[in-house]
Image: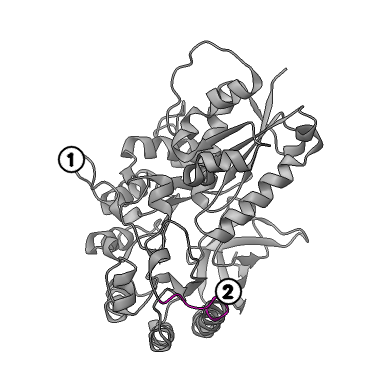
Amino acid sequence: MKHSVAFVTMGCAKNEVDSEHMALRLERAGYSIEDDPEQADVVIVNTCSFIQAATEESIEAILEVAGFDSIAAGKAHLIVAGCMPARYGADLEAELPEAAAFTPCSGESSIVEVVDEVLGIERATMPPYQFGASERSKEQASQDDVQTRVPSRRVSAYVKISDGCDRFCSYCTIPYIRGRYHSFTQEDIDKEIVRLVGEGVREIVLIAQDTGRWGDDFESPSTLAKLVAHVADTWPSVWFRVMYIQPEGVTDDFVEAIACHDNVCNYFDIPFQHANARILKSMHRAGSGAEFLELANRIRMRIPDATLRTTLIAGYPGETDEDFEELCAFVEECDFDYIGVFAYSREEGTRADKLEGHVDDDEILARAQQLRDIADAVCAPRIAERVSREMDVLVCGCEEDGELYGRAMCQAPDVDGVTYVDAGLPGDVVRVRIDDTLLYEMEGTVLS
């Protein structure tokens, strides 16, 4: 009888990818993956601790799993994986005696050995798992094959192209959790895409902590522009999207690679974090509001219908009323499609934690909400301008009430809303006329 393992994944899309790779390793080792954690022999909580709120959510998930009857009775086991063990180490083990094992990000490739040990299983040495391993070649995963396969539950998937970060932004814990930056090879990325395309995935989202750096650490350096052109040419009817690219990574070659490929979304997710040059320097980042506006103009000069998204932090230490007003003015002027706003979170161990001039917590929240309101006022009219336009929509599934929805190339998974349509099956790409919008959601009619 197979032992079963279930995953509870917290945090960002990169954690989802890590959970999927752990599940693939476990399946290859003979374990079954259980959808219901309460029915599993082992439950792995893949945690996030990027900011304090994420840590608290992960702790709540851990304690909820620890309260399962099966785990409380010792019939099943809890493993805590991911960012929290990486960030807190032995301190976490002392605080969570309910867990049978702890696996940091750097140890997730050994998850089979960890689960074996928890269950008391001994086995002969297995050949190493290969990232993105698949029996199918790129030629076998041809475009005709993709179109005739029955789509899996998901039609969109994330592919990590690197891990870690060398930027050490003053507010950020990622380098301490994930380690130094390292690119994954093009061969490994290809293998992962082959596996996903073979399962019916129609959109691949390339992600990392710093996607724009891809390839610069190879013995023979490469670039993100070359990678994007390669995957777009190899899988011409799969959508590709790039997320989390720092301003320095938006090179002319990268913009050109997107402009020259119809199957690469004209979508630029560029975290600016602030507009004031002094604050950005304190964050250990470069740039200014004027430089960021020039970058946006440069993108739109080459790709007029480009979709632009950014993220900003309100209430960073030392942010004066004047600095915040400058940030608000930047948002009013930037003409972006989507703007994510985060309230500054004070994280122990970061450089920003030791700075003077920390803003009052209530003021941080008030500034973040004010900035969100301005962002909505700027972005909603841009979304409304899409009414009467025609665009391709990837059908993703149905809401609980049966309403069919998908996403256009201008909508990234999980963050930008969806497009409701009146026809199609999951995995179909349909031509849609946009009839209406409601803030970030769109509604359209499929054209026959």
- Residue 36 location, x and y as percent? 74, 39
Q: Going 32% across and 71% down the picture, which residue do you hit?
A: 282
CA separation, marks 2 and 1?
42 Å
Judge whether residue 155 is colored magenta.
Answer: no
Q: Amino acid at mark 1?
A: Ser
Q: Please, which colouring scheme is shown?
A: one colour
Question: Is residue 360 left or right of 42 when viewed as pictured?
Answer: left
Residue 172 vs residue 32, the one in the foreground = 172
Q: Nearer the viewer, mark 2 or mark 1?
A: 1
Query: In which quarter of the view is residue 136 placed?
Result: top left
Quadrant in which the C terminus is drawn: bottom right
Disc 1 is placed on an element classified as: loop
Name the residue that disc number 1 marks.
220
How many labels were placed on the picture?
A: 2
Disc 2 is placed on an element classified as: loop
Residue 24 is at least partly visible in this image: yes
Q: Residue furthest left?
A: 220
Residue 419 vs residue 316, the one in the foreground = 316
How busy is the neighbourhood of tag 2: few (under 14 within 10 Å), some, or many (20 plus)? many
Which portion, as a residue range, is magenta?
Answer: 357-363
Query: In which quarter of the view is residue 40 placed?
Result: top right
Query: In which quarter of the view is residue 446 placed?
Result: bottom right
Residue 150 is at least partly visible in this image: no
Name the residue that disc number 2 marks.
440
Q: Which mark is residue 96?
A: none
Q: Amino acid at mark 2?
A: Tyr
- Residue 287 location, x and y as percent? 27, 73
Position of 135 relative to 229 (above/below) = above
Q: Which circle's residue, 2 or 1, is located before the other in the chain?
A: 1
- Residue 386 location, x and y as percent? 52, 78
Position of 124 relative to 28 (above/below) = above
